[in-house]
Image (spheres, helix red, strand yellow):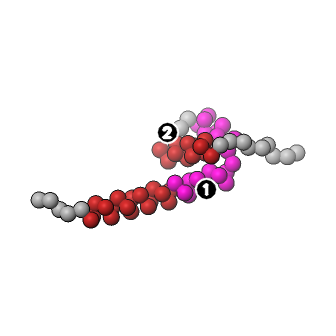
Amino acid sequence: MTAPVRQTSWLRTIQVVLWSFVGLRKNSESQQDIEKLNPFHIIGVAIGMALLFVLGLIALVNWVVAQPIGL
């Protein structure tokens, strides 16, 4: 018996990872996504998004610190 072929788009994978970052998701919808999505794609997208989030925070902090204090 062969494993089922999981055919979904990268856009759907990105949506699922974004929903998981927010934490607002029905359990039934999560179970459907787990059945349909490739776990390696989810891991890759999640690591990439976490990296972008951290780099964005670093850039924001550097921008705020570089602003002159206007008293």
| Horizontal relation, residue 32 to residue 48: left or right | right
Neighbourhood count class around disc 2 (C-alpha, 10 Å): few under 14, some 14–19, many 20 upward? few
Start and end of the magenta stretch?
27-49
The quarter of the picture where residue 40 lies is: bottom right
On whether residue 39 falls in the magenta region, the answer is yes
Distance between the Cα atoms at labels 2 and 1?
21 Å
Q: Residue at x 24, y 62 (%)?
A: 67
Q: Check the image and name the residue furthest to the right.
A: 1
The quarter of the picture where residue 48 lies is: bottom right
On whether residue 41 falls in the magenta region, the answer is yes
- Amino acid at dot 1: Gly
Towards the viewer: 14 or 21:
14
Residue 24 is tagged as 2
Towards the viewer: 29 or 57:
57
Q: Residue at x 53, y 38 (%)?
A: 25
Asked whether residue 40 appears in the rendered view, the answer is yes
- Amino acid at dot 2: Leu
Residue 5 is tagged as none
Q: Main secondary structure of the magenta part?
A: helix
Q: Residue at x 62, y 46 (%)?
A: 10
Q: Can you identify the residue that label 1 sits on?
A: 44
Residue 30 position in % (x across, y down): 61, 39
